[in-house]
């Protein structure tokens, strides 16, 4: 990511958002100013005018320590990329959600991009190839679980069958929600997907 200009030189600050992507890393700071999206990540800083933002991808990305985790990948016309997460590291064992602050920041970013006449590509969910691969993997796991369940019933192992049925339900609930939210789609500035925001 190449810095375009020093954010300190830009006036009129707007909405702000910050998070820590890792426990030992520096906080990543973002601000919506009059001139564009101002960012500061460690020693790097810059400003992207709203009209030069080429792509925004929103997705749902849960992790083991935080099931309510969302991500925005933003790309400008020069190929620079920014990643904004809805959670922040606080301690070794705590990744805290910032649901309201993240949602407000993302909605305001979209509003300002629309006001600037942005022609950015707005994408929701995973890339189609990744989503299709995930569906194939789920189908394979479902087939394996069905075979194991049939075998457990055939030999009369009711505790094994009950365990497999419970595991299948939990797997379907967890993974099914991830796949459903992350289905590939296009959206507009007036219809930001609610299921890809906290």
Image: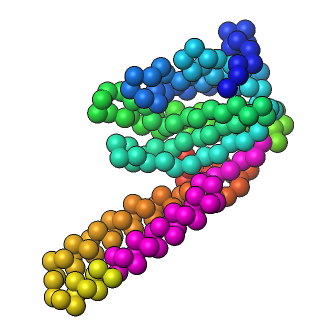
Image quadrant holding the N terminus, namely top right
Residue 47 in the image, given as x and y percentages of width and height: 71, 21
Q: Can the viewer see residue 102?
A: yes
Figure quadrant of residue 76: top right
Residue 157 in the image, given as x and y percentages of width and height: 15, 83
User: Is residue 84 left or right of 120 when viewed as pictured?
Assistant: left
User: Is residue 184 left or right of 97 when viewed as pictured?
Assistant: right
Question: Which residue is at a point 70% across and 31% down the rendered structure image?
Answer: 80
Residue at the limit of the structure toward the bottom, as seen here:
154
Question: Which residue is at a point 54% across and 42% down the rendered structure image?
Answer: 71
Question: Which residue is at a point 78% across and 42% down the rendered structure image?
Answer: 120
Question: Which residue is at a point 30% across and 29% down the rendered structure image?
Answer: 92
User: Is residue 3 left or right of 180 when viewed as pictured?
Assistant: right
Q: Does 135 lie within the magenta span?
A: yes
Q: Is residue 36 above or below residue 169?
A: above
Considering depth in this image, is 3 or 162 the residue closer to the camera?
3
Give the image's coloring scheme.
Answer: rainbow
Q: Specify start and end residues of the magenta stretch as a single range.
A: 120-146
User: Is residue 144 left or right of 179 when viewed as pictured?
Assistant: left
Considering depth in this image, is 89 or 32 the residue closer to the camera?
89
Residue 101 in the image, given as x and y percentages of width and height: 52, 32
Residue 7 in the image, given as x and y percentages of width and height: 68, 14
């Amino acid at each position: 990511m190449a810095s375009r200009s020093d954010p300190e030189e830009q006036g009129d600050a707007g909405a702000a958002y910050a998070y820590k992507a890792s426990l030992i890393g520096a906080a990543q700071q973002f601000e919506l100013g009059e001139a564009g999206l101002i960012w500061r990540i460690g020693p790097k800083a810059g400003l992207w005018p709203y009209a030069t933002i080429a792509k925004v991808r929103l997705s749902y990305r849960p992790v083991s320590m935080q099931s309510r985790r969302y991500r925005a990948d933003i790309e400008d016309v020069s190929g620079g990329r920014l990643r904004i997460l809805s959670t922040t590291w606080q301690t070794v064992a705590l990744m805290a959600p910032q649901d309201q602050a993240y949602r407000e920041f993302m909605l305001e970013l979209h509003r300002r991009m629309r006001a600037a006449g942005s022609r950015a590509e707005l994408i929701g969910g995973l890339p189609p190839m990744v989503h299709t691969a995930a569906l194939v993997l789920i189908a394979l796991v479902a087939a394996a679980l069905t075979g194991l369940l049939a075998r457990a019933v055939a030999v009369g192992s009711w505790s094994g069958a009950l365990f497999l049925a419970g595991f299948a339900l939990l797997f379907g609930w967890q993974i099914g929600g991830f796949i459903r939210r992350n289905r590939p789609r296009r959206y507009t500035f007036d219809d930001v997907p609610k299921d890809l925001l906290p």
